[in-house]
């Protein structure tokens, strides 16, 4: 006699499928290391600090895995090309969160996760896309995803640039806090420690340079 699958069984099957979609998108974007899964793990740690409910955390993890599914669906040559994008290509690429929302819904995500995919490029100051949301109009989980996605992308090599060091990526978050990123989310992110996924894939990191010391002074000031 066959046994009906449990809710946990169904969730595991869905999770495995979402991870496979995320990995396929990573490959399309030219990441040599897991990107979507890395974001999901870091984002969940940030969500814990904000005491997000279990279901909200699950939606965030799913959205992290599928955040660039729209790029995979678009199948554009320029996504894998080294070099800068033309203005037309940038406008075209800006459609990917909306397409990603649609594709993630087709893949079986809940509505919350699909909306997080749609809003993962919204900026704190309202200059993001596709809906130009600003401040707390942007759901907290989407603001977390914006910060973590940026950090993970910066600290991994892309076809058009080398990976930045952890220090350089953290400096970027601080410099754009209040513009692109929610300052409170940046502050919580910078407080994380002991998470392997935070390690940069940069080939060299000079932790003893004067520049780095100045950056750590900046971090310490921001955290006060």
Image (spheres, helix red, strand yellow):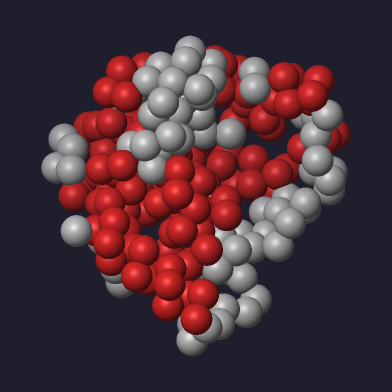
Asked if 200 appears above or below 82 in the picture, the reply is: below
Asked if 200 appears above or below 148 in the picture, the reply is: below
Residue pictured at 70% horizontal, 62% vertical:
162
Looking at this view, is 110 or 196 the one in front?
Answer: 196
Looking at this view, is 11 or 201 the one in front?
Answer: 201
* In-image side of 129 versus 51 (left or right): right
Q: Residue 179: which quarter of the image?
A: top left
The quadrant of the image that shows the C terminus is bottom left
* In-image side of 98 versus 73 (left or right): left
* In-image side of 152 versus 62 (left or right): right
Residue pictured at 73% horizontal, 43% vertical:
28
- Residue 93, percent across and down? 70, 25
Asked if 145 appears above or below 198 in the picture, the reply is: above
Residue pictured at 20% horizontal, 48% vertical:
48
Marks counted in the figure total: 0
The quadrant of the image that shows the N terminus is top left
Residue pictured at 33% horizontal, 48% vertical:
186
Looking at this view, is 223 or 66 the one in front?
Answer: 223
- Residue 141, percent across and down? 31, 33
Asked if 77 appears above or below 222 in the picture, the reply is: above
- Residue 183, percent across and down? 31, 42
Q: Is residue 115 visible?
A: no
Q: Is residue 202 visible?
A: yes
* In-image side of 17 versus 94 (left or right): left
- Residue 34, percent across and down? 57, 56
């Amino acid at each position: 006699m066959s046994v009906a699958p449990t809710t946990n069984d169904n969730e595991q099957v869905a999770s495995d499928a979402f991870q496979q979609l995320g990995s396929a998108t990573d490959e399309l974007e030219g990441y040599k290391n897991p990107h979507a899964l890395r974001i999901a793990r870091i984002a969940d740690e940030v969500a814990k600090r904000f005491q997000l409910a279990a279901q909200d955390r699950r939606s965030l993890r799913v959205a992290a895995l599928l955040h660039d599914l729209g790029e995979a669906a678009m199948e554009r040559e320029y996504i894998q090309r080294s070099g800068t994008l033309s203005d037309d290509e940038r406008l075209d690429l800006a459609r990917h969160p909306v397409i990603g929302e649609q594709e993630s819904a087709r893949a079986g995500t809940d509505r919350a996760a699909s909306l997080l995919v749609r809003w993962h490029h919204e900026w704190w100051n309202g200059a993001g896309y596709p809906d130009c949301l600003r401040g707390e109009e942007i759901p907290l989980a989407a603001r977390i995803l914006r910060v973590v996605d940026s950090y993970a992308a910066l600290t991994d090599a892309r076809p058009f640039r080398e990976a930045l060091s952890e220090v350089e990526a953290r400096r970027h978050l601080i410099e754009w806090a209040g513009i692109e990123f929610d300052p409170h989310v940046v502050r919580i992110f910078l407080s994380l420690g002991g998470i392997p996924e935070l390690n940069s894939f940069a080939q060299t990191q000079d932790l003893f340079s004067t520049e780095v010391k100045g950056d750590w002074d900046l971090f310490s000031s921001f955290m006060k």
